[in-house]
Image: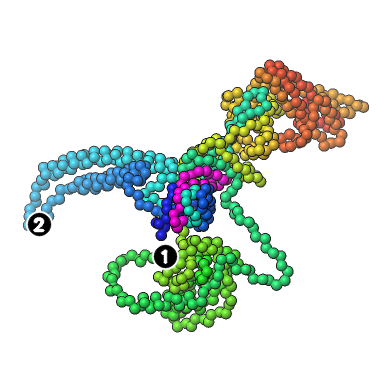
Amino acid sequence: MAGQRAVWESRLDSVVVHAVGAVCRRRASGVLPADGRVRVAGLPRLAAEGSLRVRVLSGAGRVAEARLGYPARVRTPDERPSWDRELTELQAEVERLEERRDRLRARIAEVAALRAVPPQRRREDGHRRAPADAVLALAEFVDARLEVLQERSVELAQQLRLAEHAFEVAAARVRAGSSAEQPGGVETGACAELTVRGEGPVELEVEYAVPGAVWVPTYRLAHHRGERSARLVLRASVAQRTGEDWSGVRLALSTASLVGGGGLPELASLRIGRRQAAPAPSGWRAQPAGLAGLFDGWEDAQRSKPEPPPLPVAVSAGPPRPVARAARAGGAPAAPGASFVPQAPPMAAAPMPMPVAAAAPPPAPSGPVPPGAAYGSAAPRSAAFAPPPGAVPPPPAEAAVPDPRPSSEQLDYAALVLAGPEQEPLRRGRLFPEPSPSRPGGALRGAEEVSRLPLPRYGSWPRASAGSFDHRFDAQAPAHVPSDGVWHTVTVAELPVGVRTSYVCVPSVEEAVYAVLELSNATAHALLAGPVEVTVDGDFLLTAGLPTLAPGGVRELGLGRAEELRVARHVEVRESTSGVLNSTTVLDHAVRIELVNRLPHEASVEVRERVPVSGDPEVRIEERPGWSPPAEPSAQVPSSARLRRVVVPPGGSVELTGGYVIRIPAAKAVVGGNRRS
């Protein structure tokens, strides 16, 4: 009856790409038929079951039923994609050339096997002279023929190599192309089977989830020297292989995950007293009485029919092929008057088979049972465990069978199908879930491959860098992302950020000055970790890693060495003695640091030095003034570090002085020598 539905075409309107997967929204409009049965076409094959949502945007209508359908259509040769026809033709050409090569090889082997065979000599015959001229003529014929065939073989091998190369190039182009177009003569897809109550024209929005879509954030920072603000362009590298091209859609990016459940958890009551039985699931009722005898008349009518003459049986040497059943092994009723009875397991062949009713069913599980499982059914018995001939089956065990707990699939009323009289006796007249169409395994594997794509340098997955918050970014312009499974860059938004350029140097370790860009996020958007391309005054500087920056947060971004700033460190150590009888050794370390600025503007430089730390109470360390310890010590800046910030004018230089004095007993020495800086 699905062919009687009104078919409405749909267009993709918006896509929200999550950490893994995406949620797509399509729009369709039309005039409702009298029965309200509508089919919205255009959905991809990988649309997730259970994620379908339909709402009425405009018009007088109300959605009463919505489910996914999987129609198939046979295409004419002209409707197949051009690349599919090209690939088929190239493959046929390769097979034709391979067949010609095999025939030519057989012909060469046949000609090369030509030999002169003398006639069988009889006993009374005398010796005969060998026909040398005939043997030489045959040899010349074989050589000439083989020369021609070998030339054809070389030419054919060259043609075959070119054909195989063309086929491999076309196949690689198909693998790298979009998966929206399907090969073959049968076109399969998904659609939304709807029942809408109302009349007149309506506009519908169909929402569904698809796997095979990922994204990572990337940035581009452009600022000018001396300015306190910059433009940060938020971009996203998006890869998808969902089976449909996103062309001209409103794109949004979310850090949330689609894997976790979104249902509200149930809060169980705390009871003190006797244990109470769990309530029966809503929408389920026990089977009606007398259902087993409902089909007795149909069975009698089937027995009274004359049997057809036996067909001739073809004897085959191979083993018989097993016949696969399309029906599921379990199910549940969902409508009033329906019932739930497990499917009988296959019984082992034996002279005295045990009846199904004689098996004691095990207790029902307490939680939901996966689709296809049978409640209260015994495990299938193999031939090794079959009762021996003449054995008496044991009496049935007296055990109370608790009420089963149908799963969510078995309570999906729209997906239940009533089994007819041609089914097994235990399935007749009962409702079972309709077998879901098998999804294309290759398309699903291709969709899962995008989650294993190599990340760009400094790239990070959104779920790993988002931490405990979820955020959504809406693109300002329509985007185009084909379903080819490679990274595509999409511009999302342009955010103003505060910047302050400072410089840091540690001359005691390396005489070099490093530039540090301090970013402050004053917007309402969170910035995730990812690569950022930094441009200064229109010139590309480098690609760095931007850390996660929450709204209102401040982080530092290293920009590498600043060649326009120079630093030099000079140390002078003087050793002397003091105290009574020269009992104390004085080590005076004088440090002088020179900074030169070749930038067109002033530069704020933070100079980091270090002082020794002693664990001996007899050793005293005296520091020169002007240097301060870090406010918040860390692994990079320990508590023994001393900092000093100085502003170097453009084209000028600054000289800093510092150092420390170590006073130790004369009988002791510094590890490594007293004269070292």
Helix, strand or loop at label 2? It is loop
Instruction: Examine the rendered structure and indicate whether residue 602 appears above or below residue 204.
Output: above
Q: Which residue appears at 38% of the width and 78% of the height?
A: 300
Q: Does the magenta stretch include residue 83?
A: no
Picture coordinates of residue 190, whole percent (x, y): 45, 52
Left or right: residue 405 compared with residue 646: left
| Magenta span dominant secondary structure | strand
Residue 122: numbered disc: 2
Residue picked out by circle 1: 325
Instruction: Examine the rendered structure and indicate whether residue 65 appears above or below residue 175.
Output: below
Q: Is residue 22 magenta?
A: yes
Q: Which residue appears at 51% of the width and 71% of the height?
A: 337
Residue 465: numbered disc: none
Instruction: Mark 1 or mark 2: name the one nearer the start of the chain.
Output: 2
Q: Which residue appears at 53% of the width and 51% of the height?
A: 55
Q: Is residue 396 visible?
A: yes
Q: Residues within 10 Å of mark 1 (few under 14, many from 20)?
A: few
Looking at the image, which residue sits at the far right? 580
Picture coordinates of residue 128, whole percent (x, y): 8, 50
Helix, strand or loop at label 1? It is loop
Name the residue type under label 1: Arg
Quadrant (top left/top right/bottom left/bottom right) for the C terminus? top right
Query: What segment is highlighted magenta in the picture?
Result: 10-36
Picture coordinates of residue 423, whole percent (x, y): 42, 70
Its colouring scheme is rainbow
